Amino acid sequence: MTTTQWLTLSDLGRRFGLSARHCGHALDHEGWRDHNGHPTQAAITAGAAQSHNRYQHGTSNRWNVEICAAVLSKHGNRPIHRSEQISQWVTLLEAMEEGSASVSTSPDQMAEDLPFDLIEEVNHQLSHRGCRFQVQRFEESTSL
C-alpha cells in the first residue's frame, strides 16, 4: 500500500532544484493555482492539492508529490537525486560554517530549510568531512 506524500510548494520545488516561485509557475500553467497562489478547484479535483484554510497564506496548502512531479517533468524539470541533494546541503553548510563577511545568514538559519528526511545523512556527511556543525531539528512540522 502506497501512502500519498503531501508537500508545501517550497518543499516540492526543492526536490526539483526549483524555487517555490518557479514550481508554482508550472502549476499555474496547469490551471492549478489561482491568482493568489492557492490551489484551484481543478487541482483539488485532480488530487494534486489540498487546501485546509484559504485565508492562511501558503503554509496550509499541500501538493501531491506524485501528481505534481508529473507536471513538473512535463515542463522539462527533473528531480534531483537524493545523494546530490545531500551533497549540495553538506557543501553549503560546510562553507557557511567556515564563514564569510559577505554572508549575513548563519548555518543554523540556512539549515531551517533543510528537508527533515535529509538531516541525519547531512549530519553524517558533515561529521565525516570534519565539520563540527550539525543540524539541530528535534521535530518536524506535521500540521496537515
Image: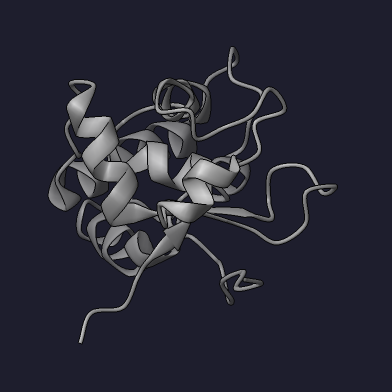
- The correct choice, above or below, for 124 with respect to 85 in the image is below
Left or right of 112 in this view: 52: right
Left or right of 122 in this view: 24: right
- The correct choice, above or below, for 25 with respect to 89 in the image is above
Quadrant where the N terminus lies?
bottom left
Relative depth, front residue between 112 and 72? 72
Relative depth, front residue between 82 and 144? 144
- The correct choice, above or below, for 25 with respect to 72 in the image is above
Quadrant where the C terminus lies?
bottom right
- Residue 107: x %, y % from top left: 54, 42
What residue is drawn where x is 44% and y is 64%? 116
- Residue 141: x %, y % from top left: 62, 69
What residue is drawn where x is 85% and y is 47%? 55
Q: Quadrant of residue 74?
A: top left
- Residue 99: x %, y % from top left: 51, 28
Q: Quadrant of residue 76?
A: top left
- The correct choice, above or below, for 28 with respect to 6 in the image is above
- Residue 115: x %, y % from top left: 43, 55
The structure's colour scheme is one colour
- Is residue 45 at all visible to an observer of this figure? yes
Left or right of 68 in this view: 141: right
Relative depth, front residue between 46 and 96? 46
What residue is drawn where x is 52% and y is 53%? 44
What residue is drawn where x is 50% and y is 42%? 42
- Is residue 134 at all visible to an observer of this figure? no
Outermost residue on the bottom side: it is 1
